[in-house]
Amino acid sequence: EDKVVQSPLSLVVHEGDTVTLNCSYEVTNFRSLLWYKQEKKAPTFLFMLTSSGIEKKSGRLSSILDKKELFSILNITATQTGDSAIYLCAVEARTSGTYKYIFGTGTRLKVLA
Amino acid sequence: DTEVTQTPKHLVMGMTNKKSLKCEQHMGHRAMYWYKQKAKKPPELMFVYSYEKLSINESVPSRFSPECPNSSLLNLHLHALQPEDSALYLCASSQGMVRDSGNTIYFGEGSWLTVV
């Protein structure tokens, strides 16, 4: 059975700290891994990763994929209170000729002022 | 434009009611999805439409009935729901199978459903 596991489940840090969120997966026919940020509404897209070892970066956020060890990390440096959210990892995998996205449980991040 | 539009944003319905959730995208995406999300849980896949055909049904009860009238629209018809069906229902879309290098899935704002 396909599965995506995120760790830690929750994290509390202070502003300015650096955090690393983990996502490991076991799926057949992997195609891509995506990171999303979810506050009170729908998830918003952060990164899509398809190749190992290539870092994607956007401001204070960065992410990298390891397809050999089947995991990805999301780093947030100099955290701010606005980074408080649930961070979701989703893996795009092919099943029955169709691609679907399997979500991890999410990591709930709280950044204290 | 990376917009997926869902209506209504909020819906309260009785267990004997029939209602529908609507979703629209104009990005030319050929895959559309319905997800259900309960509080503090990740989105759970319900249905996938690919090129307007139902390609995945994740064993969803028949009281949920999806419909894809055309490539831009996706509906979810609701009938005889239970209080435990109360959740955030998310519509999403992606390019589909046309690209080999992976697709980004874009979510709508969601429809908050309360069944009383």
Image (cartoon, rainbow, N blue to C red):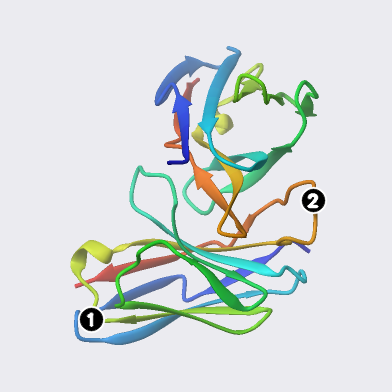
Q: What is the secondary structure assignment of the residue under circle 1?
A: loop
Q: What residue would you read off at disc 2? A: B100
Q: What residue would you read off at disc 1? A: B80
Answer above or below: position of B39 versus A17: below
Among the 4 quarters of the image, the one containing residue B13:
bottom left
Q: CA distance from mark 1 to mark 2?
A: 40 Å
Of A101 and B73, the residue lying toward us: A101
Res. B85 in view: yes
Of B19 and B47, the residue lying toward us: B47
Answer above or below: position of A100 versus B42: below
Residue B44, position as x, y percentages in the image: 42, 53
Residue A112, position as x, y percentages in the image: 47, 20
Residue B104, position as x, y percentages in the image: 70, 51
Please name the amino acid that badge 2 sits on. Asp
Among the 4 quarters of the image, the one containing residue A98:
bottom right
Tell me the crowding category of disc 2: few under 14, some 14 to 19, or many 20 or more residues within 10 angstroms, Cα based: few
In the rendered structure, are the residues bearing label 1 and label 2 in contact, judged by CB atoms less than 8 Å apart? no
Side of B59 relative to B93 (left or right) = left
Answer above or below: position of B92 versus B40: below
Side of B99 relative to B16 (left or right) = right
Whether discs 1 and 2 lie on one chain: the answer is yes
| Chain of the residue under label 2 | B
Residue A108, position as x, y percentages in the image: 44, 31
| Chain of the residue under label 1 | B
Looking at the figure, which quarter contains the C terminus of chain B?
Answer: bottom left
Q: What residue lies at 52% left-to-right and 32% top-to-bottom?
A: A26
Looking at the figure, which quarter contains the N terminus of chain B?
Answer: bottom right
Tell me the crowding category of disc 1: few under 14, some 14 to 19, or many 20 or more residues within 10 angstroms, Cα based: some
Side of A56 relative to B83 (left or right) = right
Q: What residue lies at 47% left-to-right and 76% top-to-bottom?
A: B8
Of callouts 1 and 2, the N-terminal one: 1
Please name the amino acid that badge 1 sits on. Ala
